[in-house]
Image (cartoon, helix red, strand yellow):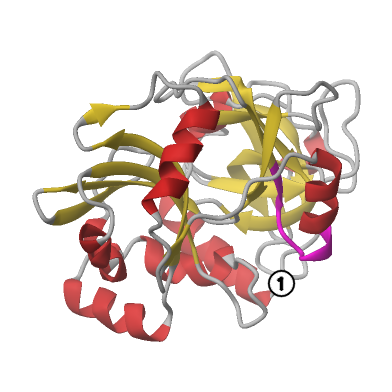
Amino acid sequence: MLAVPGGLPASPGWAYEFKWDGVRAVAVVRDGAVRLWARSGAEITTAYPELAGLRDVAGEAVLDGEVVVLTEAGRPSFTLLAERMHVREPARAAHLAATLPITYMIFDLLRLGGLDLTGLPYAQRREHLEALGIAGARWAVPPVFADGRATYAAAMEHGLEGVVAKRLTSVYRPGLRSADWLKVKLEESREFVVGGWRPGVRRVGGLLVGLPAVQPGRLTFHGRVGGGIGAAAERALLAALEPLRAARNPFVRGTVPRADAKGAIWVQPVVVVEVKYGQRTPDGRLRFPRFLRIRPDLTPEEVAGATG
């Protein structure tokens, strides 16, 4: 189940959790083993061997949560997590589990002892989850709060990404994006798809970004993003984009201004990035945009399905 962007609800009947800057994972604990699945449906068990111990504390269950890497200050770091996300070799995963361990933030319980809980209200699923008492070194059940404004203020104080508001009566709808879950970010940001880049003083002077259009494989242009691209980000972007060079401009014809298209290097529109910005113009162009990070955990189809 996925959240939609929004503001803090003004009405009662909501619970509030911190928004963790990581990647979503569903843990299936069954027959003395733990298997992990990403939002894409890919199995990611090998990447996180430190979660194997869930088999000893969760019984037979299906858990939903976020995999994060915490810094020494206790804040999630998506940059550090990127080193863990796509590891598929057991030996390397075991090494990273010792040197760069993850924490699994468990926020929902979908099955317990063979019983499907997805039809229960969120408040009841939460009660069942907390009753399991499964806190451990590499996993935790983060707290839930009743005061949205106080939770938002606490997220800001601790440098977290934001807050997720969940309607107490909401059932769990697998695979759907529902307004019963609202993600409230501390800063205005959104995911976009990269359609190309323009060289500048650096090799990547600015990213040309957009959103999937009605025509398959095409993008609507939303702006050029030059801010926030430091040396490390530039290396990561080039590694992701260089193999995707394409002869064709992937943006809808006539939407990229001539000044932005001049000297552009086009790419296949598959790389998703998160961009922080001030406002949008009436035609959807970004004002004061800054690159935040690559989002290898998202596909262009998921970006197209997100509103806000």
Q: Position of residue 209 (x, y in %)?
A: 67, 40
Residue nearest the viewer, comparing 228 with 114: 114
Q: Examine the structure image and report whether residue 160 is included in the region drawn in magenta.
A: yes
| Residue at 50% across, 34% down | 300
Give whichever of 274, 123 is nearer the camera: 123
Using the rendered view, name the quadrant where residue 167 is placed: top right
| Above or below, comparing residue 54 to residue 297 in the picture | below
* Residue 75 visible, this angle: yes
* Position of 234 relative to 123 (above/below): below
Residue 250 position in % (x across, y down): 55, 31
Residue 221 is left or right of residue 57, and the answer is right
Specify whether residue 264 is in view: no
246 with respect to 220 (left or right): left
Say what amino acid the circle numbered 1 marks: Gly
Compared with 126, 151 (above or below) is below
Residue at 18% x, 72% y: name it: 90
The front one of 257 and 87 is 87
Q: Quadrant of the C terminus?
A: top right
The residue closer to the viewer here, 161 or 273, is: 161
Q: Which residue is mark 1?
A: 230
In this image, 64 relative to 273: left or right? Answer: left
What count of labels does the image hold? 1
Q: Say whether residue 89 is magenta.
A: no
Magenta stretch: give its range: 156-163
